[in-house]
Amino acid sequence: MKTKALRRNLTGGVAVLISVVVFLVPFAFIFLTAAKSAQEASALDVSLPTEWFLWQNLVEVMQTRDYMLVRAFVNSTVLTVVSVTLMVVMAAMVGYVLQRRASRWNPLVNFLVLAGLIVPPAVVPTIWVLQTIGLFKTMPGMIFIEATFGLSFCILLFRAFVSTIPKELDEAAIIDGAGPVRLFFQVVLPLLRPVMVTVVVVQAVNVFNDFTGPLYFLPGSDNATVQLTLYNFQSQTLNQWNLLFMSIFLITIPPLVMYIFFNRQIVAGMTSGAVKG
Amino acid sequence: MSMRQGARKGSVVLGTAALVAAMAACSSGGGGDGDQIEITFLTQSDTDNVAAAEALIEAFEAENTDVSVTLETQPGGTEGDNLMKTKLATGEMPDVFHYNSGSLLQALNPDQNLVDLSDQEWADTLIEDMANVVSTDNGLYGVPWGSTQAGAVMYNKPIYEELGLEVPTDWAGFMANNEAILAAGTAVPIIQTYGDTWTSQLFVLGDFANVTAQDPDWAAEYTAHNRFYADDPALQGFENQQAAYEAGFFNEDFASALFDDGLRMLATGEGAHYPMLTGAGANISLNYPDNVEDVGVFALPAQDAADTRLTVWLPNAMYIPNTTEGDQLEAAQRFLAFTQSEEGCRVQTEILTPSGPFTTDACELPEDAAPTLTDVQAYFEAGTTFPALEFLSPIKGPNLEQITVEVGSGIRPAADGAALYDEDVEKQAQQLGLEGW
Amino acid sequence: MTTLVANRSSTEDTLKPRRRRPIKSSYPTWFYIPAGVFYFVLFAVPTFASFYFSLTRWTLFDTEFIGLDNFVQFFSEPMLLRGFTNTFVFGFLTSGAKVVLGLLLGVFLTSQLAARGYLRSVVFFPVLVSAIGVGITFKVLMDPFGGLINSGLALLGITGPAWLTDPSLALFSVALVDIWKGLGIATLIYIAGIAAIPQEYYEAARVDGANAWHRFWRITVPLVRPATTTVVLLSLIGGLRAFDLIWAMTRGGPGFTSDVIGSVIYKQYQAGFYGLSTAGNVVLFLVVTAIVVPISLWFSRREVER
């Protein structure tokens, strides 16, 4: 028993050590550069700043372009929360029926799902469509776009994980008199929690970090999203590395917080009935 | 019009509520309260541009109380090129926008998309070279914003003084200087920074005035598909780059160094020569204020001293898309005219840090200029300057920077690279629908 | 425990035909409609419109119908062959690594382990940073002169290579970073997959005296197949289409040595050759489909067989 615990701690310790080198050092670099003066930062090396400018840089980044970063945070948060909710629900419905119901249409649907992953979106025609339905340059339009572009990824995951839910459960619920809607939302969806958390985390990060989408489909300073703020400090000839990295640092925090929160959800999902050893 | 009312209602209710109306209203610049005319000005999102734009707007609004200008920004570079075209093609361009002149402007189809400004008062004040690069056969579309700059060799003056070197006027003299610097061993003769690929093009692009000196019709003939980079005199730029690489004059980290590294080396004397756009002077005064006096400029030398000319980049300009109409159009034209006023010039000199002479009679250079500027001015006064190719021909291939990285790293010989570039520009010419391609 | 797994599938097989009919109405087709509407309006319509433009010379302002010239032009791109080679190398290398490492990490991080929560978070960190941020950061870390990686190797007495500027190495360096960045997603999917494996199987296997290796190979690997399918498809499609990280780190360079099809098309697009780049996308679509669809079918057949 004792040796087992020891071994566990040892492997854990080694893993922690490796993870520090492989995963944390790059973040240390981002953080340190964000705390330097403009001149020191332009050397782009990993060293402690001779003088800490963390607070000054933070204030300067926040104030740039009339608190653009703050607006961008609000916009990106709204965009991420609504579009991810939308795509997760729609994709779960599709993935569920696609896996459960054998139909001669399935190959076509499967192909369309894959096509959605393979074909890059066509920018200008999409703008025309948005203009036609009057949603171009609007937050709802952008939300719909993100939700649509994320569908395929989500459907693929849900389809895969619906197959791990025993069909006996469906059967039992149907015998209890559950209709299709109740069966899905009250029986199946709760069981999909681990994969749903995965999908939410991955897609939330994708939407939050999306750069080209908002750039083309949501122009306008009031509509700025966080990735666009990076361009305030970056150009062909003049990079303000300290501010750029401060911006990278700041916009990485919300996904980080979200992940730490959801990570617990995954753990919770697991202890409630799955792997222990 | 009804779209106006819709927008006004939208500002009363929550902004997001007026979805449909907002979409229509945006294309006309949006409605406003009372008599205030609202226009939107689009520029690139880097600090310099934004600072200048904000200062300009502030000065403009102080004198034109009936207009309020909203600033909008977007990334520059090739991503920006696409955005500009997308916005014009979908009718979503803000009322005034700031963009390159020359070949990049031509790719926007000015005749089809922009408002002709040749009837404006300031139109006559532009120097001829400038008027050419914001015009087509059918009209003049832009007002210059900022100063010229040169594509030339920026050099470290203390090194030259220490080693007793003279500014070279022909290629052999330049190479001899490099040899002397290499022998002295204190500094790198030529700085190259291929970590930022665009910086690799200067040997070729900055040599163009020398090409024009040898063959005045080169640009026009090139556009007509009668001249090629694979032939002299244009081939020389590629060959010079290869020769400099082979002589071992580059910094050892040339393949990964960044533009910022290059400036540091130049300013602090780690390196002697840096072929670069002289707009980089602004970065030096920002990041290395103590070294501003240490950096000078000379033209990339031609083989024959008699052919050596300074290659000049003309400034960007401001344009009005033809989706701007009515009051907005009138206000936008006032905004453009304001850039050439005394106050407009003040912003251009104080905030945009000139790196060469202005292209209009309206503005004057400051007295206490840095050597990077006065050296460039000397060439202008001597009349030994020509514009860069991108201001004389609409053709510029997308892969030049990759090719010059290869030539400058010894991956591909100069002649090969030049031939590959000739092939590369064909697509561009076909896309533009030019004759003879 | 093998018997246990076999039992399960055989009961399923015998039950299936009997069950299918009455249950079918419980899986209504209208569940497709919300997603279908979005997909059709905002994705299918624009995509079909753009396919037309692949047959034109398109400046965004004008179009000129030129038939298949764009495809001819695309196939005569000087760097096309290298682009395809690089695309396949990059796609298979990164997706292979993500599958193997993701599965191993998934198992490792679902086992009893000190600092498990921390490790899980850390593995996922890279996913949180945008490609731009990762690209800038690693360009600095991989700098051959004074970059952190080579400085570290120098301490161990190893002379590090010129990661991103050596023409024969650049593509692999980017692939390494791509794996670093994408591993978190693969691991997360595997963790979710492993979490879905009923615990009884492992307990039964332990009673049967199966060691850890057997449990991994006979239970975990077969039963996480849905997760594997997903990881393979996602990372392969992502890898074959990739260009953003390559663009951020090397711009396809030095020169053209790390160009993939995705970056060739992106450069055409950036240069304003909209018709040509659309044609390139059509070609890339066909190539990726030709690779991915058979793999997808193979996986789904295996799933049915089971």
Image (cartoon, coloured by chain):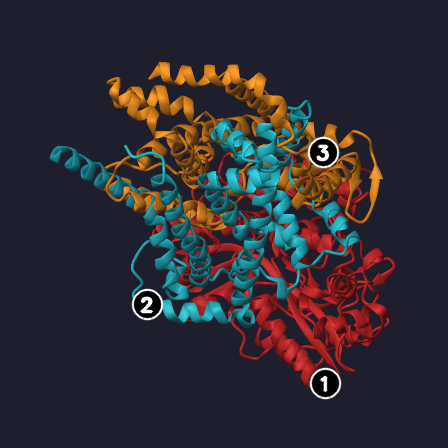
Across and down, in percent, residue C288 comes to: 61, 27
Quarter of the figure with residue B403: top right
Residues at badges 3 and 1 in contact (C-beta under 8 Å)?
no
Q: Is mark 3 on a helix, strand or loop?
A: helix
Q: Say if B187 sits above or below C123 in the image.
A: below
List the residue tagged with mark 1: B65
Total numbered labels: 3
List the residue tagged with mark 3: C279
Chain C palette colour: orange
Disc 1 marks which amino acid?
Thr
Q: Say if B83 sits above or below A95 in the image.
A: below
Disc 3 marks which amino acid?
Ala
Q: What element carries label 2?
A: loop
Q: Which mark is residue C29?
A: none
Chain (cyan):
A
Q: Residue furthest front?
A: A176
Across and down, in percent, residue B21 comes to: 77, 64
Question: Which quadrant holds the N terminus of chain A?
Answer: top left
Disc 2 marks which amino acid?
Trp
Q: Specify few, some or many for label 2: CA neighbours under 10 Å numbering under 14, 14-19, or 20 or more.
A: some
Q: Which mark is residue A52?
A: 2
Q: Specify few, some or many for label 3: CA neighbours under 10 Å numbering under 14, 14-19, or 20 or more.
A: many
- Would residue B209 be seen by someone viewing this image from the given angle? no
Chain B palette colour: red
Name the chain under label 3. C
